[in-house]
Image (tube, helix red, strand yellow):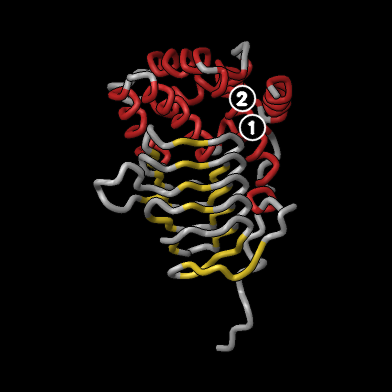
């Protein structure tokens, strides 16, 4: 992965000399994928009171302390590259895809949250919300191979859980219901596709391999390998167990029945 990213950066520098300095500082000047990503995130999130040099150390230290983050973000890069037909290079994901950058910021914030550095975790959450327009509570749990296409307006609550190989579009909300329950937010299974504007509220379970249509509101459990759509969402059909909706990104098939208007 790192070798491919460096080859792409060199090639792009030669094709577009104007970007040579940018690509050198962001990728080619670094010895590892982790260091390059830490640099990119630090410079995206810096502010007058959060220096990029401080953020760089925070991100890199977390990558070193928890190798699972590296495994997860490598899977995320692959997910973006494989599932988004507009993505031609691995380096594009790291440099330009704010959904990917928001996810990696969350992974670091989650590490800080679970190791007792909650004030810093919340600071990263707040800054990521300002910069990427993605608001994910540091306590929320994410699997690997997660893709947020466009990502603007995504909200993920404190007790939400997202499985492996999940894809979601912009304006997806995994929101809470009530204030007293220990678990207030949704649990999304593996291989799930959440269309644009999907709103899932409360401690509901979205089964593995399920596809939720754009604009749907889900307030009840959805069985695995189902196709659900509507307000409120209802199951319209089934997905073959061999199909992973998150990977094929097909947002048109299986939603519409025999409608007469």
In terms of secondary structure, where does tag 2 sit?
A: helix
Residue extending farthest left: 180
Q: Quadrant of the C terminus?
A: bottom right
* Picture coordinates of residue 114, whole percent (x, y): 39, 24
Going by the image, does 170 lie left or right of 201?
Answer: right
Q: Quadrant of the N terminus?
A: top right
Q: CA distance from mark 1 to mark 2?
A: 6 Å
Q: Kindly state the secondary structure of the residue where label 1 is placed.
A: helix
Nearest the viewer among 247 and 161 is 161
Q: Name the foreground residue: 83 vs 17.
A: 83
Circle 1 crowding by C-alpha within 10 Å: few under 14, some 14–19, many from 20? some
**Does residue 153 appear in this view?**
no
Name the one closer to the observer, 183 or 105: 183
Evaluate whether residue 24 shows in this view: yes
Identify the image quadrant of residue 201. Answer: bottom left
Task: Give the quadrant of residue 131.
Answer: top left
Q: Residue at x 62, y 22 (%)?
A: 20
Residue identifier under label 1: 75
Residue of label 2: 71
Q: Position of residue 57 (x, y in %)?
A: 43, 13
Q: Residues within 10 Å of mark 2 (few under 14, many from 20)?
A: few
Residue under the image location 54 percent in, 54 percent down: 194
In-image side of 123 versus 227 (left or right): left
Residue displayed at 63% across by 52% down:
209
- For this rendering, which residue is in front, 221 or 8? 221
Residue at left 41%, top 37%?
140
Is there CB contact under 8 Å for labels 1 and 2?
yes
Q: Where 34 falls versus 45 (above or below)? A: above
């Amino acid at each position: 992965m790192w070798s491919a990213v460096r080859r792409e950066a060199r090639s792009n520098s030669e094709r577009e000399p104007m970007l040579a300095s940018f690509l050198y500082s962001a990728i080619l000047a670094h010895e590892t994928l982790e260091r390059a990503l830490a640099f990119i995130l630090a410079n995206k999130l810096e502010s007058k009171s959060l220096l990029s040099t401080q953020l760089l150390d925070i991100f890199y230290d977390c990558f070193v302390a928890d190798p699972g983050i590296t495994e997860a973000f490598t899977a995320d890069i692959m997910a973006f590259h494989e599932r988004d037909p507009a993505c031609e290079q691995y380096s594009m994901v790291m440099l330009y895809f704010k959904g990917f950058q928001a996810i990696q910021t969350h992974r670091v914030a989650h590490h800080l949250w679970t190791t007792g550095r909650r004030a810093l975790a919340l600071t990263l959450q707040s800054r990521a919300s300002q910069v990427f327009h993605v608001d994910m509570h540091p306590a929320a749990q994410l699997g690997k191979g997660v893709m947020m296409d466009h990502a603007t307006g995504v909200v993920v609550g404190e007790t939400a859980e997202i499985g492996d190989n999940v894809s979601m579009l912009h304006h997806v909300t995994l929101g809470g219901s009530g204030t007293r329950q220990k678990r207030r937010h949704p649990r999304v299974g593996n291989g799930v596709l959440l269309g644009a504007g999907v709103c899932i509220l409360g401690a509901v379970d979205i089964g593995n391999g399920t596809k939720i249509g754009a604009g749907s509101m889900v307030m009840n459990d959805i069985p695995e390998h189902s196709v659900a759509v509507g307000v409120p969402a209802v199951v319209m059909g089934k997905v073959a167990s061999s199909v992973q909706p998150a990977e094929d990104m097909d947002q048109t098939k299986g939603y519409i029945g025999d409608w007469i208007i």
